[in-house]
Image: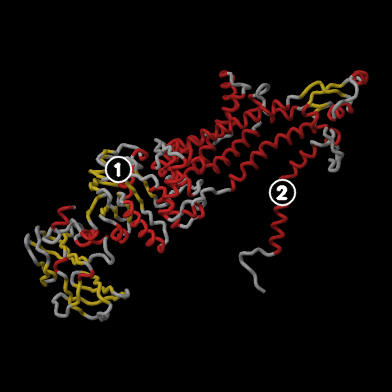
Amino acid sequence: MSFSVTEPSGRQKLFAGFLVAFYALVTIMPLAWIIATGFKSPADAIAYPPKVVFEPTLEGYVNLFTTRTRASDEALQERGAPETWYQRIVRDKGMMIVGPSRYGERFMNSVIIGFGSTFLTVFLGTIAAYAFSRFKVPLKDDLLFFILSTRMMPPIAVAIPIFLMYRQLGLNDTHLGMILLYTAVNLSLSVWLLKGFIDEIPVEYEEAALIDGYTRFQAFCKVVLPQAATGIASTAIFCLIFAWNEYAFAVLLTSGTAQTAPPFIPTIIGVGGQDWPAVAAGATLFLVPVMVFTILLRKHLLRGITFGAVRK
Amino acid sequence: MARIEIRKLRKDFGDFTAVRSSTFTVEDGEFFMLLGPSGCGKTTTLRMMAGLELPTSGEIYIDGEEVSGRPASQRDIAFVFQMFALYPHMNVRRNIAYPLVSQGMARADVRRKVQEVARILDIEDILDRPVGGLSGGDRQRVALGRAIVREPKAFFMDEPLGALDAEFRERMAGELRALHDRMGATTVYVTHDQLEAMQMGDRIVVMNHGVVEQFGAPQDIYDWPATMFVADFIGSPAMNFLHFDGAVARGACRIGLAGIHVEVPALLEGGKGRLALGVRPEHVHLDDSAPYRGEVLAVEYLGTTQIVTIETANGALKARLSSAQPVRTGETVGLAFDARTLTVFDAASGRALLSQANREVLAGG
């Protein structure tokens, strides 16, 4: 009987497959539970033992986006028959819709702050990384270490000074304040990641462009940036995920105008306490932008565009 | 087209001096070689000429204009990199067109120029391909295309054949030289390969440790090296050095090697102490009647010729002999040298002593 050193045996493959499936199950489980809870009725959501099979309803989503009030039967009769499917869902519970909820605003705040800080971080990070990579910067190593050192303690350790500072500067509960904060926290990661990517781009490309009659800035835009696209995309994903999911600063520094979705979602209250289906629905929708962003940029992460152009 | 003049060019990187004080002139239309071992400063010199590196001191004239402080984009030169540096996110056509686009040339003109260059280089069929999948030779041609499309004053090439496979290299060397002859453009070419330099160059500068050791026509440098470094670096196998102690007087026509007189070209300067007689392998002949003798250590057969290593009283030496000549390892043979071709060196300084024979070459360099 012959056997191969490099090819795993059937039993090994089976074991590996089992391990991967088990790990996937463990990680996907909470996510699947949240998505499922979004479609449960409030009673099913807190039922014990937990319900795996249930009758799906959009009540959670309707509650997420609306503000409702309990009304007497007469008041409901007066309003006539419900016109839309979501009005009907609310009416069946003996309530009526009095307006939209704040979820939409909070979601938009997350979008503005998340993407705004990501753009700013990547923009500044690319420029700084290019300078560190290509130019003689005095005290370069010390500066790079200093930039990295801003991440050596958890950002929340400086929460109180930042809170006091922001109050003085009037940046509390503003979009600008949150964008600046997330940019500051992410910038070190961005500079270090991008410097690695730009270091990999041979300097000859820029030199060729300089000789071909372009200025350094043109060479940077037309030759360096397209090749750094992969690095810029992956850095942007990291930064967005942090800014999008950040909770602690958001709780501390925002309460109204600039409040992001993470501190808002857990505060969704229904009849008789926490409205778990609405909270789950809010969390599910909150996942979508980051997922879409990651999927859109995925091809940049996978494509090695410099492949074969330089002989190594 | 342009004449390029380099005067006392120097470049320091911190404490390290890459180029000490280079002075030479590249004549209009010349194929000029910068030759030397790695780390000798030849690439730094070329980069300063191109404007990719600022000189610490010294002057660079292109067509009589002092350009050492100007950015590369204003020098109107083209540069071919060893790694080609083709823009990976563009196809062949856009790579070649890129220098024209920067000048704001009209689209139709760009198209016509690119087509014309592609025809010269025989790459018309790959114009719309991405550069990623091209063979080494094709990439080299595209890099050349990008250089010649702009019709610059001069071409600078940094070991452009260094990244090619051996089989391509010879072919591209021929193509490069043919292209140069056709366009008549001033070309400065950096290489560490002495054969390449001899084969392609009109003139050669030999550099070592940031210093120009010699510059001149390939044959002059080969025949009459100014220093032991040049003698050793150029030619394969290298020039033999037979070391001896003693003194030679000005006007002497012979030297004493292990007590035997050897005729040399009349010396125009004297020397004493550690000296060396330089003799090319092809200028060593076997002669049974010769008084200077040695023992054959090894024989390498190379087809038409053979390289014979002979141990003498002044060190080992290699002779290039016809393969027809029977030589056996271990036998003792008499050695005769072609007197008109010999050079005497001062082994301490490495400098060649001026003689009647090398006077003209060394006076010029």
Neighbourhood count class around disc 1 (C-alpha, 10 Å): few under 14, some 14–19, many 20 upward: some
- Whether residue A302 is visible: yes
Question: Relative to residue A267, is residue A193 depicted above or below?
Answer: below
Question: Relative to residue A305, is residue A173 depicted above or below?
Answer: above
Number of numbered markers: 2
Residue at image coords 68%, 21%: A256
- The amino acid sitting under disc 1 is Asp
- Whether residue B58 is visible: no
Quadrant assignment for the N terminus of chain B? top left
**Residue A80 is drawn in which quadrant?**
top right
Question: Relative to residue B226, is residue A243 depicted above or below?
Answer: above
Q: Chain of mark 2?
A: A
Residue matched to label 1: B12
| Image x and y of residue B39, in percent | 32, 52
Residue matched to label 2: A24
Q: Is residue B281 left or right of residue B168?
A: left
| Image x and y of residue B30, in percent | 27, 51
Of residues A287 and B170, the one nearer the viewer is: B170
